[in-house]
Amino acid sequence: MTGSMSAPTTTAPTFETDRKVVKPTPAELMEDTGTGLDYGTRPDRMPGHLTPNDRFFIRSHAPTPRLDAATWTLHVEGNGVREPIAYTYDDLWSRFPLASVVRTIECAGNRRVLFGEEIGRRFTGTQWGRGAISTAEWTGVRLRDLLEPAGITPGAREVMPEGLDEIRARRPMPLAKAWADDTVVALAMNGEVLPADHGFPARLVVSGWLGAASIKWLGRIEVSEDALYVPWNTEDYVLIGPDFPADEPALGPAINALTVTSLVELPWPARLRPEPQTVRGRAFAGENRVARVEYRIDDGRWQDALITSPATPGVWVRWQFCWNPEPGEHTLRVRATDDQGNTQPESSSWNELGYLHHSVLTHPVRVEQAAPRGGREGNACGRIRRGRGM
Ligand SMILES: Nc1nc2c(c(=O)[nH]1)N[C@H]1C(S)=C(S)[C@@H](COP(=O)(O)O)O[C@H]1N2
Ligand SMILES: [Mo]
C-alpha cells in the first residue's frame, strides 16, 4: 500500500458543503435568483405536464437541512387535540392509506421582477422571473388521517405545520383546509422519495394556496383553539398597501388561495423562425379551475388557445396554439380566466412586498427574416388536427 492512497481524504473539496441546496441547479434548467437558496424552473425547459424533480423550483429561507428518517418524528400537539401523538417515518409509510395527488406549487412572489418593471420600481425580496411555479405528483398521507387519532377538540380552529429548518417555518390554516381530501403530507414526489431540497422526509402540500403554506421538512403540527399569529401571516405573505387594510396584529390580509395566471413556454425575449409552429404554455387558477386561455398577437384580436390537459382545481393546465409569424418584432399576450369568471388583469394591485403579480404580460418575440434551409419541418402545426376553439 502506498502513502498516496490516503491523501485524498485530507484534500477533499469543500464546495459541496458550501452549497445551501443539495440538488444541482444548472443554468440550462433553472434560473438563479442570486440568493443561493432560490431557483426558478426555466419556462422554456418544461417538458410534459409534471415538472421533473431535477428542475422543480426551489424556494427556501434557510439551507436545506439534512434530516435522518430513522430518528425523525412528526409530532401532533396543541390545545386543539385531546392526546398529543408522534409518528415515525415508518408509521407514515405503513399505517395509513397512501394518497397521490398532482398539484401545482407557486410562490406568492413569482414574477416579482416583472411586477417591478410594470410599476417602474424594484421590489426587495427574491428576484423571481416567471419560474417560481412547478407541478408534481405528490404521494403520502392525508393530513386529516394524522390529526384524527390525536382527537380533535370541538373548539379546534387552526392547524399549523412547522418545519425543522433553521427558521422553523410556520404557516397556519383553518381546520377545514387541513381536512381537505387533497391536503397531503407528501413522502414522495414524482415517484421518487422526496428530495432533500423539497422537504425530505415529509412536507405538506396545500392545494391552490401560496407555496409558503406547503411547509417542508415537517417536524410538528400544532392544532389550536386560538387564532395563531406568526411572521408568515403577519409580516410576510400578507398584502401591505393602500388597497389592503391592516388586520391586527397583521400588517395586511394574509395571502391564501392564489390568483389566476399564465405562462408562455418561451424564453424572454423569445426568438422564433418565420414558419408554422406550436406555441405552448400553462395556466393556473389556485383553488379554482382554469376555464379559458386566450392569446393576442400584436394589436390583433383575442383568440382562444386550445387547453390540452384536464382543468382541476390546484393544478395548472397546458395550452397551445398554432402561429405562423411574419419576420420582425412582435408581442404575444396571453390571458387566462377561471371558472369563477376571474380574468388576468392589465395591472396588478400594488403591494409593498410585490406579491401576486398576475397581470397580462407583453412577451417580446423576435422572428427571424427567413427560415434556414431544411428548417421547415421543425414544428409544422398547420398540418396537425385543429382543436375546438382554434
Ligand atoms: N420549512 C420550510 N418550508 C417551506 C419554505 C421554507 O423556507 N422552509 N419555503 C416555502 C415557500 S415560500 C415556498 S414557495 C415553497 C417552495 O417549495 P419548493 O422549494 O419545493 O418548490 O416551500 C415553502 N415551504
Ligand atoms: Mo414562496
Image (cartoon, rainbow, N blue to C red):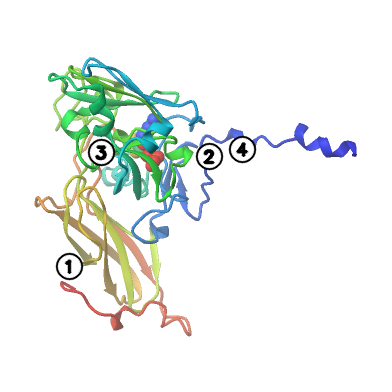
Q: Residue at x 31, y 78 (%)?
A: 381
Q: Amino acid at mark 3?
A: Thr
Residue of label 4: 16
Q: Is mark 1 within 8 Å of ligand 1?
A: no
Badge 1 or badge 3: first in the primary sequence: 3
Which marked residue is nearer to the observer: mark 3 or mark 4?
3
Per the rendering, the mark at residue 77 is none
Q: Position of residue 125 (x, y in %)?
A: 37, 34
Quadrant in which ligand 1 is drawn: top left
Q: Position of residue 317 (x, y in %)?
A: 25, 58
What distance separates the C-alpha of mark 1 from that of mark 3?
Answer: 33 Å
Q: Residue furthest left?
A: 341
What distance separates the C-alpha of mark 2 from that of mark 4?
Answer: 8 Å
Q: Amino acid at mark 2?
A: Val
Q: Position of residue 231 (x, y in %)?
A: 30, 22
Residue of label 2: 22
What distance separates the C-alpha of mark 1 from that of mark 4?
Answer: 48 Å
